[in-house]
Image (spheres, grey):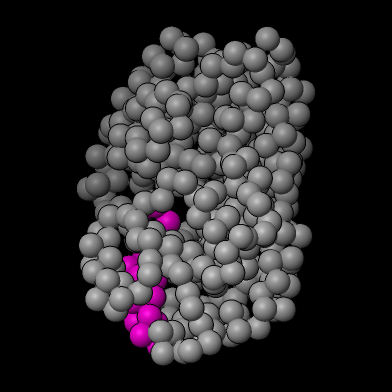
Amino acid sequence: MKIVIAGGGTGGHLYPGIALAKAFQNYFKGVQILFIGTEKGIESRVLPGEGFTLKTIEVEGWIGKNRMTLLKTLIRFPKSLGQSYRLLKAFRPNLVIGVGGYASGPVLLVAAFLKIKRIILEQNVIPGLTNKILGHWVHQVFGSFEGSKAYFPRKKFFFSGNPVRKEIINIRAGKESGELTLLVFGGSQGAHAINQAVVDALDILKKDPRLSIQWIHQTGPKDFQWVKEQYEAKKISARVEPFIFNMAQAYETSDLVICRAGATTLAELTACGKPAILIPFPFAAHRHQEKNAYFFKKMGAAEVIDQADLDGRLLAKKIEGIFLTPNQMNLMAEKAAALGKKDAAEAIIDRCLQLGLGHV
């Protein structure tokens, strides 16, 4: 059994692919898995540590680009098709999986030309342009939200949930330490608005004698040194990292999470049952993060702060409100856990087998 997983660029696209790859490894003895992405994407940093092989192609996105950049991107697109063709012919996969991101487009189009079985994962309620197009060229579309059904051929759509890494699903429910721990992250590149608000909230929270907070803060590379120095100057205990590779440990240690509202992040929160303060990225396509966040708030699983309203004082008030009412925090955790689909990867594999992939 040989499988290609195409796409990446961000953790939101890559980590469901990693979760699915590991599920295939558990299911098929001796399965060979090849990731195809780009050199600029997060996959070039993460996959070597996960033990997977990565091959790269030259492709860029076209959404939001000026005319000259768009023209250059379109001119280069045939090259990415040629690179994809050579990789697929050499590897000869039984299945090609698109997880979103720039690399998924050319790889899946070539897979269709070569008549290789192919599927895509759609993490958001409203799909991007690439997946809308690819939905007509694949055998199956697996959605994280049932509402995505309206954007794809009805017979091809299957509501599976978003695959989450087993190490996150399997974290321990309870904590040995009684200290309150707050996990902050804004995606693989960080989020300056979140970093700034947290730094501004530190002095306010430090003055509250009822709170003793341990911080785990993923800053992104640009803000790392500045944020680290802020914690040190304020003499506040914190683990500050530009990027956290072992997110399972970070989730397990935390009592509350401050983060964006991307679909993969939300799937992880539900898988490990963590309450959250969601700060949706306001410039996400189709405002899908805002829709995700307010759905979680409606279900009682999270609090939401719009980035336009975000400042240190409001963030500190939200944190205090949750930490000082343990019953509310526990209820939010229960509501988050109730939204999860922990068997998403297994459900996808079962459907893939119906495509006639066969067994090793």
Q: Is residue 52 above or below residue 153?
A: above
Q: Is residue 184 above or below residue 128?
A: below
> How many numbered discs?
0
Q: Give me the residue at 46% from left, 36% from top.
A: 7
Location of residue 156 in the rendering, given as x and y in whole percent from the top left corner: 72, 36
Q: Main secondary structure of the magenta part?
A: helix
Location of residue 292 in the rendering, given as x and y in whole percent from the top left corner: 60, 64
Location of residue 118 in the rendering, given as x and y in whole percent from the top left corner: 60, 26
Q: Give me the residue at 24% from left, 76% from top.
A: 233
Q: Give me the residue at 52% from left, 50% from top.
A: 249
Query: Does residue 309 show up magenta in the picture?
Result: no
Camera-side residue of 196 and 330: 330
Query: Which quarter of the rendering shows the C terminus?
Result: top right
Q: Is residue 164 above or below residue 296?
A: above
Whether residue 259 is visible, yes or no, is no
The picture quadrant where one finds residue 103 is top left
Whether residue 24 is visible, yes or no, is yes
Location of residue 108 in the rendering, given as x and y in whole percent from the top left corner: 51, 28
Q: Is residue 200 above or below residue 297?
A: below
Q: Which region is colored magenta?
A: 187-204
The picture quadrant where one finds residue 51 is top left
Residue 24 lies left or right of residue 8; in this view the side is right
Q: Give me the residue at 41% from left, 16% from top.
A: 87
Query: Which quarter of the rendering shows the N terminus?
Result: top right
